[in-house]
Image: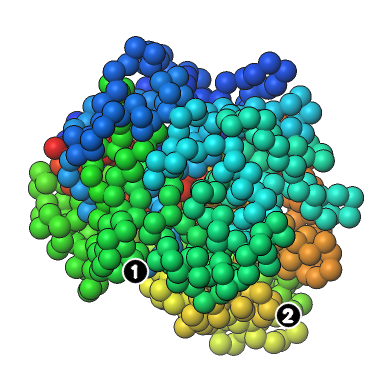
Amino acid sequence: MKKRLLALLLAGTMVVSLAACGGKGNEDQKDPSPTPTTAAQPTEGTKQPEATPEPTPTPVPVDTMKFSGPPTISGDVTERIPVASDVFVEQVSASGEKLEIGVYGGKLNLMGSSSSWNASRPILESIIHYNTDGTYYANVIKEFSHSDDYKVWTFKLREGMKWSDGAPFTADDIVFWYEQCHLTNFDTKKSWTALYTPDADGNPVYATLTKVNDYEVTWTFASPKYPADFIENGDFKWCWAPKHYLEDLIPQSVYSGSTLSDEQALANAQAKGLSYATVKDMGKAVAYYFWNVPGIPTLNSYVLSTKAGVNDVKGSLCIFDRNAYFWKVDAQGQQLPYCDEIDFIMTSAVGQEQLMFLSGELDMIEVGMQDISTMLTNAGSKAYLRTFSSTNWGSYQVTFNYTCKDEKLAALFANKDFRQAMSISVDRTQVSGLLSDGFLEPGQACPGEGNFGYDADWETKWTTYDVATAKKLLEGCGLVMGSDGFYDFADGTDLVINFYAYVDSTADSAYPVLEQYWKAAGIKTAYKGDYALDAFDQEIDNNTWYAVIIPHTAIGGLSLRSRVAPFVPIAQAAEWYGEYGTYYGTNGANGVKPTGAMADLVTLYEQWNSTPDTEARDEIALKIYDIHKENLWTIAYLKAAGNYNLVSSAIHNWSDNLVSDDLYQYGNIVHYWTLFKK
C-alpha cells in the first residue's frame, strides 16, 4: 500500500491557471523554506524540532544587504526593522516558488466579512509558519529549541523588532501575555492545551515561563511536552501582547497584581477610544481578537486603520494600513509589505462580488466551480485562477449515529455491510454529473491524492455501483423486504433513516439526488434539513439524531497535526463518532465507552501524542488511517472539491499549489505581505 507522508502538492486535483503575473506550476519550485536566519537553529544542549525545513540552496547574505523601505515612510528603515542578523528575509512562497522582487504602492481590494477571523487571514503573524508540505519554521520568534527530555522549550526573539507603534517587542511582552492575559483567562482562551500538561488526575499543570533576557524565554513543563502538543499545536498561534498598551486595561479582579478596579480599567479603555460593557468583553476583544481593534499595536503586516468610518470590520469599507515597523524584507532588502493597504469591501447583494471583480473593484474573489468557466471567459487576460487544494476526505459525506438511542438502528449502522450497501447503491458517475456537472470525480471518504496517507485502493473502496449486491448485503444484515418495496427490520417494523442537515449546507441539493438511489435499493429515508446551525449542533450534542448528510465537523483533514478531533473520538466534536467522543472528553463521566476499532483509535492516538519523533508519529497516524479505511464510518460519494479563487492579473506572487487548512490559517498561506500590483 503506497502512502506518501505530507507531500501536499495534490497532483490529482484540478489545477487550472492562466499565464499571468509570471505564475508557473511545479517546474519552478524550489525548496519551500525560509533563509537560515528565520529557521529554528539548535543551541548547545538542545535538539531542533524534527519538522523544520532544510535551508534554502542560496541563503541571502543579510550582513551585506542594503535595506530600503516604502517611499511613503520617511526616516531610516534600519531604525524600524530588527538588526540585520535577525531580520526575516522572504525568498520563496509557502509552496516553494521563488518570489518576484516587488514594487511599492497600491492597495489590495478584498471581499469584506463580519467574521472576527476574516480580517486576520491576510495579516496575522504566528509563532511558526507552515509550508504546504507540512514542514514549518520559526516566524515571529527567531529560534525555538527544546531540552533532551522535552520539558524545557526555549524561544529566542529578534533583536530590535518593534510593535506597529514603534515600541520595542521584547520578552516582557510574552511574560505579560502569559501571566496577565492568558493564565488569568482575560483572553478567554486558557483552554489552550499547548501550555499545560495533565497531572495524575488529569488536572492541568501550566508551564512556568521564565524571562532569560530581553530576547529569550523558557517554558518549563512538569512532564514532557512534545512538538505535536506544543510548537505544532494549531491553537497556539501567538504568545505575546503589547504590555505598554494593555497593562492599564487589566483590573485587580482579573490579575491580583493590578491595583485597578473594573470601572477604572473600562475608563482607561474609553480614553483609548475603546468602549466595552464588561471587563470580560474587553479582554476577549483586546487580548484575543486584537487585530479587529483600532489602536492596538500588533506585529502583523497590516494594522487596522484608526481613521473613523473605515476601521470597523463589519463596515462597508474596512482598511488595514501597512505596518511601518514590519520585520520582514524581500531578497533585495526592501521592507515588506509592498502594498500600502488592504481594503475589505462589503458587498450588498448575492453575486455582486463577481461583477465587482470583473469591473476591477475587487482583486480576488472565491468562486464556485460551476462559475469558473464563465468567469474566466468574461475576465479574459484580466484574471487567473488559483486553486487551494482541499484536505477534505471527499465531498457529499454521509455518516451515522453509532451510539443512537434506537438500539436496532445503532446495531445496523455498526454493521460494515450496511455501510457498504449505502455506498454501492449510488451511481457516483451520475451523481458527479448531477451535483458538479462532471467537475468532481467519483471517490470515497479518504485522503485525496497527494495528501498524507493517500491510498488509491481506499479511494475506490465501495465505489462500484451495484444495486444487486447492495440488496444482498442489506438482507445479510437481517433486513427483510416489505410489501411496499422497502426493507424492514426482521421483527416487521419499518426501517426509516432520518438524515439531518443544517441550512446553508449543500445538503438541500445533495439529498434528493442520493435519495433516489437509496430508494431504488429499498432503503427508505427522510430529510430533516431545516435546522439552523446552532440547533443542528444541539441535536448532535443531545444524541437525538440518526444520520447526517454533509456533517458540520467532517471526518478527516490535513493530518492529526492539524486537528485530532476529526480523526479520533476524543471530544464531543465530530458527528461520525458521536457519544464515543463524549466519553473520552469527559473522562468517562458521560457518553458511551468505545470498544473494538473505535477504542483502538483512542489507544493509537495516546501513543501518537506521547511520541516525540515525527517519523514515528506519522507511522502511528497511518495505523489510525488504516482503521478508517477498514471501517469507513463515513461515506463520501465524490472526491473533495477545492477552494477556487479568481485573482486579478495585476497581482504578483500569488503562489499556486497552496492548501486550505486551519493549521495553515487558510488564506494566510498566500503570504499577502509579499503580494504586489503591477
Query: x, y (%) of residue 315?
Result: 29, 69
Q: Which residue is mark 1?
A: 314
Q: Is residue 516 above or below residue 26?
A: below
**Which of disc 2 and disc 1 is earlier in sequence?**
1
- Examine the rendering and report whether any part of residue 205 can be seen: yes
Q: Please report the residue visible at 39 percent of the width from the left and 44 percent of the height from the top.
A: 164
Outermost residue toward the right? 200
Query: x, y (%) of residue 144?
Result: 60, 29
- Depth check: give the residue in front, 203 or 384: 203
**Colour scheme:** rainbow
Which quadrant does the N terminus fall into? top right
Q: Is residue 583 left or right of residue 522?
A: right
Q: Is residue 653 above or below residue 242?
A: above
Q: Residues within 10 Å of mark 1 (few under 14, many from 20)?
A: some
**Disc 1, SS:** loop
**Disc 2, SS:** loop
Q: Which residue is mark 2?
A: 406
Q: Quadrant of residue 157?
A: top right
Query: x, y (%) of residue 244?
Result: 51, 49
Q: Please report the residue visible at 82 percent of the width from the left and 39 percent of the height from the top.
A: 223
Q: Which three-letter amino acid code belongs to the residue tagged 1? A: Lys
